[in-house]
Image (spheres, coloured by chain):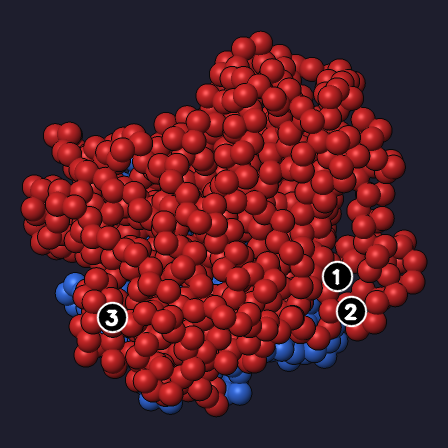
Chain colours: A blue, B red
Amino acid sequence: MAEQQETRERWGMVVDLDLCTGCNACVTACAMENNIPWVGEEEAGYGRNMFWIRVQRTWEGEYPEVSPAYQPVMCQQCGRAPCEPVCPVFATVHSEEEQINLQVYNRCIGTRYCANNCPYTARSFNWYDYTYQIPAPMNYYLNPNVTVRRRGVMEKCTFCVQRIRAGQEQAKAAGRTLQDGEVIPACAQACPADAIIFGDLSDPESRVSKAARSQRGTTLLEELGTQPKVTYLKGGGYYGG
Amino acid sequence: MSDTISRRNFLKLSGLSAAAAVLTGCGPAARYVTRRPYYEMPEYAVLGESTYFATTCIECPAGCGLIMRTFEGRAIKAEGNPAHPVNHGKLCSRGLTGVQGLYNPDRIQRPGKRARRGNPTLEPLDWDTALGVVREALNGAGAGVAFYLGLAPDHLYDLVLELTQAIGAPPPVRFGALGMFEARATLVEAVRQVFGEARFPYFDLAGADVVVSFGANFLETWLSPVAYTRGFSQFRRTDGKKRGYLISFEARRSLTSGVADEWLPVPPGTEGQVALALGSLLQSRGWKVPLGAGQVDVEASAAAAGISMERLEQLADRIARAEHPLFLPGGQALAHAGGLVAARNILLLNLAAGNMGRPGGIFLSPSRPDSGSLRDVQALIEQMRAGKVETLFIHGANPVFELPPALGFTEALANVPRVISFASFPDETALQSDYVLPDHTPLESWGYQRTLAGSDRMIFSSLQPVVVPLYDTRATADVLLSAGKLPYNDEVTFLQSKLATLLNEPGVTVEATEIATFWARYLQAGGWWTQQAGLTTPTNQPDLQVEMAQGAAAPEGQFRLITYPTHLGDGSGANRPWLQETPSPSTTVMWNTWVEVHPQLAEKLGLKDDDVVRVTSPSGSIEAVVYLFPAIRPDTVAIPFGQGHTALGRWAEGRGANPAVLLGAQLNEAGDLAYGDVLVTLSPTGRRRPLSRLESRAGVYGEH
């Protein structure tokens, strides 16, 4: 059998903050796709929400010139991820195939070192068995392609790796390469303003690569040298093109 | 086991297994474990294929197209239908959590009868008996039967309309909280007065370059939020065109005003005056604004709105320079005593801009809107109070929760001998009903929704069951048809007879010459719509003039109240844990009701974040938690709508407060609730209750 051509996509994301309205549809979409449990009012008050993506709202200026800025923040899928070297059990690792940072739930022993070392606070920890508390029949909608996590396990955005795998397998079965826009994570799929673009950064012609080259592009805390794979396009005015 | 094994035997066994281990160790690759990433774990090998069904979201009347992913007979994930003209594959938080409605553990699972209204226990009823009750009610005096329907689904409204005609009953009253907050009746009446036809307007945001919004929260719930968000996205993009510039007049910086390039916090109720002042300034810049005979006092209007003349002139310059300026009359501007005048003034600005039927302009939806105003609801309440209603059927609405108690719906209900609710969830109205004959939830239902308010073309968006109904529920259409008053065997026959009028139409997505083919393709595509965009171009009525609208300042010690709907929609979303947990975008608060108070006002009143205050209006009072909100007028406070349920299941009940209690029964000229004119006072209770919020508390607005 001939050796299968190895495809090495470099998955990345661009969030256009000029288009983002802050509506939080991405947050809900992510939760419904990735079996993210809700934690309830009290737990939420302790900051134990399990969001894999959150919309940060900050205020700028003084009334009446006060203006909100919204920024969806998820795991930035760092090229040099600060969460990885601190895990004593190699539960947070770089996947060679997808070039993304993944959490291996059955290795995780819950030291939470990774969350402490993540400059984006993108990781959330299962303080309790939230998912197992979902009353029947509400557990019927749980996505069979995504592991349900238990207490004591860290979790975070995976760039919807189950969708990446499904897309790759579909393309492989059809004997072709992945098309641009074929794999869309749940947040980008739902985003009513189409502010989230996802795709292969190794293809200079992909939509995401073009957007990432925009003059408005910036990455979060890039001075830390984390090499994030999420680029934000500055909003709120006439920046660049 | 260890009890029965002696030490000698144990050693023997150990020796044996050690030998076995060595033996197998020599076998091929058995001692080498291949480490695989977690997504290829054995239990992760998901066998089987997902099945996708096209249907329509009826969480709100907008009617976005859905593609439901199902797996082994279970609905897994709601995704947008990429081909659907309303949402183009996109969805909002409400639509995404549809499965939490379908699989809600608090659903009403079978028909029941209540021994006493208000008693939460339902005595089970078999469907034959239940159908007998409905038959008897419909056989009785026709005029004594009344229907109260929500804004969705449309096919049920069409069926009930035919039914009421057949039995000589008054037409169904159709009303919902979302319609109340966007002041639908006022909008449609203003369109009738300005353009001669009572239609929903469609604003082509995508083609405009300057949009002036008067309290239109089009990114949240207004008319068709997903469609308008897409329009906004196009408007903002700079691919080969200018970046769209959004100007918003609204007392509170809502999600929509939040993305505005300029936000002008005018007092609620002065939007019509601002439109008038802008009209006058634009006239001096060459626009043909039909101004009234009386001199327009621009300076007085600007002063009333708290805008400097210089700023207003700058705005007028910007609008005059624009190629496609567009003016949006939103619910916050229309829900006042002078709301109809305000709506007309704003529409007349569109007229003066030459916006009728041009790209970036205003179009009219092809069909007449069938939702009523609060005045229709008031007339029904009068009938109920007078004892003229013998049987009241309620579907798709929760009037006991949604309507301001000042209207007296709940009291009038006591004079109705028989109340039949079709609710799927144990809401407040179902609790006050004698019979609950649960309908299937939308994801288990047939039907259609005509999308009138958020689409550039005529659409019949299809509903089909994506899963087998979970419980012993029955389609309301089938229940009503079982009385034999209409010539249809069942719901599907009814739907097909309605859709048969669309056969043989050219240039549509579903071209078929007979109904079976049509039906199959229609369900597969997610509905029927024309290939080309096409809406009516409005024509203006002569002799209509911009008028002075009145807006009064709040007296000392009282504050204007803004009540606004959130992603909980008409309040029915409160029983979905993920809608509760999705943070409010501008405050990041979850799971509760808060009252937004400007830090200046809070300081004056001695209020701090998380203080519980009593908010009192002439109609009633509620308690809510203070949230210091920097982007609201200091003379105005705001409370989100949707919480404060006394029923509706474990996640909704006893959570937050219902601001409908504060809204009076004051209607505007078009019969919509003037909820924007409500004045409230705040008094501290001395208690504190921390709100759960995503944002950090530290250093956001100073000390706490």
Name the subunit of mark 3.
Answer: B
- Residue A169 location in percent, x, y? 66, 66
Looking at the image, which residue is at 59% across and 73% down?
Answer: B539
Q: Amino acid at mark 3?
A: Asp
User: Which of the two labelled residues, at mark 2 and mark 3, occupies the earlier sequence position?
Assistant: 3
What secondary structure is found at the residue carrying circle 1? Answer: strand
Q: Is A187 drawn above or below residue B165 in the view shown? A: below
Instruction: Name the quarter where the N terminus of chain B is drawn.
Output: top right
Q: Helix or strand or loop: what does disc 3 sit on?
A: loop
The three-letter code of the residue at mark 1 reads Trp
Q: Residue furthest right?
A: B514
Residue of label 2? B508
Query: Crowding at label 1, few (<14), some or many (≥20) Cα neighbours within 10 Å?
Result: many
Q: Are marks 1 and 3 on the same chain?
A: yes
Asked whether disc 2 touches disc 1, contact meaning CB atoms under 8 Å apart, the reply is yes
Residue highlighted by disc 3? B297
- Mark 1 and mark 3 in contact? Answer it, CB < 8 Å: no
The residue marked by circle 1 belongs to what chain? B
